[in-house]
Image (cartoon, rainbow, N blue to C red):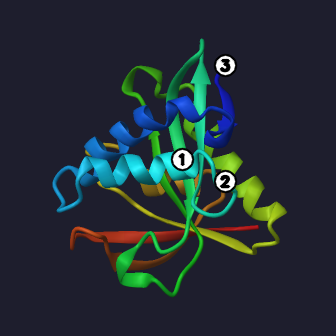
Amino acid sequence: MAEIRLLKECPDYAPVLAYWSYNEWYRRRPIDYDTVIKAYRQRAVDDRMPITWAAIEDGMPVGMVTLKEDDLWSRKDINPWLASLYVTPEFRKRGIAELLTLAVTGKSRMMGLTRVHLFLGHAGDMDLGRYYMKRGWRYQEDAVDNDGLPTKIYYYPL
């Protein structure tokens, strides 16, 4: 079973998480890898948002998630966000994404927040809206994602 730890507790994993993030979301944008790795190294030492968790199994990172502000550029008025949820393909369908999500909602609740938001990525054949709704997330509205594509915003009531 994967263990969920703050990146601050395992800072050596920052380059791996930055690599995943860059390949998954930033490679096709005008954001270079040095910028992404700098952000993850900062998350490994800072207590303020963005806060990142790593899922670790057998001493290796297998997933990540971040609690952050201003994740959806077209809706900077909505905060905070569950962002950068990623589990390596060989570790998917083992409940790791749900554990990572619970880390974000639990921390948000401890911070006195009343909601956490997310917007759907484009995951091929996976019905992300259905996945989140089965776990208590609620549809909020349609929007445009950071690449100009249609997306849906969901929130989790705390």
Q: Residues within 10 Å of mark 2 (few under 14, many from 20)?
A: many
Residue named by callout 1: 65
On-image quarter of the C terminus? bottom right
Locate residue 81 relative to residue 109 in the image: left or right: left
Q: Dots 2 and 1: beta carbons under 8 Å?
A: yes
Let me know if residue 19 appears in the view: yes
Pointer 3 or 2: first along the chain: 3
Question: CB atoms at circles 3 and 2 under 8 Å apart?
Answer: no
Image x and y of residue 61, in percent: 52, 26
Quadrant of the image containing the N terminus: top right
How many residues crowd around disc 1 within 10 Å: few (fewer than 14), some, or many (20 or more)? many
Q: Nearer the viewer, residue 70 or 137?
A: 70
Q: Disc 1 marks which amino acid?
A: Val
Rendered image: mark on residue 139: none
SS category of the residue bearing label 1? strand
- The residue that appears at 31% across and 71% down in the rendered structure is 145
Secondary structure beneath dot 2 equals helix
Q: Which residue is mark 3?
A: 1
Q: Position of residue 112 (x, y in %)?
A: 82, 71
Label 3: how many Cα within 10 Å (few below 14, some 14–19, many 20+): few
Mark closest to the chain's N terminus, 3 or 1: 3
The residue type indicated by label 3 comes to Met
Which amino acid, by three-letter code, is at mark 2? Answer: Val
Per the model, the C-alpha gap separating discs 2 and 1 is: 8 Å
In the rendered image, which quarter is residue 44 located in? top right
Which residue is disc 2 drawn over? 104
Give the Cα separation between the discs numbered 3 and 1.
17 Å
The mark that comes first in sequence, 2 or 1, is 1
Picture layout, residue 66 above or below residue 110: above
Query: Residue, x 61% and y 40% (percent of image)?
Result: 7
**Residue 55, horizontal then vertical, whole percent:** 59, 31
